[in-house]
Amino acid sequence: MSRRPQAPGQHFNLVPSPEQAVTFTEYFDLLTRHCGREIISLPFKEWVALSGNKWLSGLREALLALERAVPPDSLQIFRAENLAWLSGEAWKLALHRSNDTPTIGQYLRLRWQKGGAGHAAAFAAPGADYAMSTAELYDPVVRAFTQATLYPCLFLDDLLSSAREQQFGQVSLNINSVPAHEHDLDPTSAQAKAWELYERLICLMLRLQRQLLADPRPAVARYATELPHWLPATIDFSINSAHYHDLTDIRATEQIAPPTVIMTDKPTVWSPNNLTPPPYKDPT
C-alpha cells in the first residue's frame, strides 16, 4: 500500500472473506474428501501420549532443534512453505488416483508445491548463517529470481527421475510428459519443449541475478550470489545418488545409463534477449 499514493482511506481485503475462510480442521476435512484418504486428527494430549513411538519422538526432537536454531521469521516462512508442500503432495495424489494429466500451467504450480522448493528458499539464509526477512524473501523481484533458479532444479529432478517413475505409474506427472500430452508431441519433441522452458528460466535467472547483486540490502545480494549453487548441486546429487539408479522393479529392455553432463555458458535453443513470457497459464 505504501507504493500507492491513493491508498490512504481505501479499504483492502487482507484476509479471506468469511464465506471463503476455513478452519484448520475444515481444511484437512476437505483434503480427506478430495484425496480419498483419511487424515486422522488427534487431540494434543493423545499425541503426547504416543511418545513411545520412536518416529514421533524423533520428529518432536527435530522440531525442537529447528526452533532453537532458526530465527522466528525464517521459521514462520518454513511453516508456510511446509503447508504448501503438504497441499502439493495431496494434489499429486488426487491426480494420480484420478488418472488426470494436468496442463503445463497446472503442473508448474503443482511441481513448485510438491517439490518443496519453498523449503530450500526458506532455509537458504539461516542455513548459511545470515538473516533474511519475510519482506526480503517475498519481494516480487526476489521471488521471481527464486522461482527462476529453483524451477530448473525441479526440471532436472524430473529428467533424472523419469526412469524410476515408470515403476510407480507416475510417468504422466513429469515435465517431459506433460508437454507431450498437451501438445500431442512425441517423447523427443516433448523433451525439447521442456528443455526450452528450462533455458528460458535460466536466462531470466541470470538477468535477475545481475539486478539483485547490486541491491543495497546485504542479505538480498548474498542470496542472489548463493542460491544458484543449487543448480550444480542438484546435478551432482542426482547423478551420484542411489535413489536415481535403483531400477530393480523396472522391466527395461535395455540398460539405462546416467546421462552425460555437459556444462556450457551459452543457451542452446533460446536467446537470452528474448523476454517473451512462457505461454503457460494455470486456469485454476
Image (cartoon, rainbow, N blue to C red):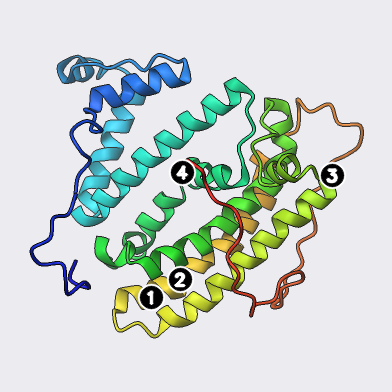
In terms of sequence position, does the residue under pointer 1 or pointer 4 come before the other?
4
Question: Do residues under tags 4 and 3 come within 8 Å of each other at their CB atoms?
Answer: no
| Rendered view: 205 above or below 63 | below
* Residue under label 3: 186
The span from disc 3 to disc 1 (Cα, nearest Å) is: 42 Å
Q: Nearer the viewer, mark 1 or mark 4?
A: 4
Q: Is residue 137 above or below residue 112?
A: below
Pick the front one: 87 or 227? 87
Look at label 2 and name its amino acid: Glu
Image-quadrant location for residue 180? top right
The span from disc 4 to disc 3 (Cα, nearest Å) is: 27 Å
Q: Nearer the viewer, residue 58 or 270?
A: 270
**Between discs 4 and 2, the one toward the N terminus:** 4
Please name the residue that numbered disc 2 is placed on: 226
Mark 4 touches mark 2? (CB < 8 Å): no
Q: Residue at x 31, y 48 (%)?
A: 78
- Which residue is tagged 4? 113
Q: Amino acid at mark 4?
A: Gln
> Dot 4, crowdedness within 10 Å: few (<14), some or many (≥20)?
many
Judging by the rendered image, the residue that carries numbered circle 1 is: 222
Asked if the residues shown at circle 1 and circle 2 are in contact, with their CB atoms under 8 angstroms apart, the answer is yes
Badge 4 element: helix
Number of labelled discs? 4
Counting residues from the N terminus, which is met first, the one under dot 2 or under dot 3? 3
Residue furthest to the right in view is: 253
Distance in Å between CA atoms under marks 1 and 4? 25 Å
- Give the quadrant of residue 22: top left
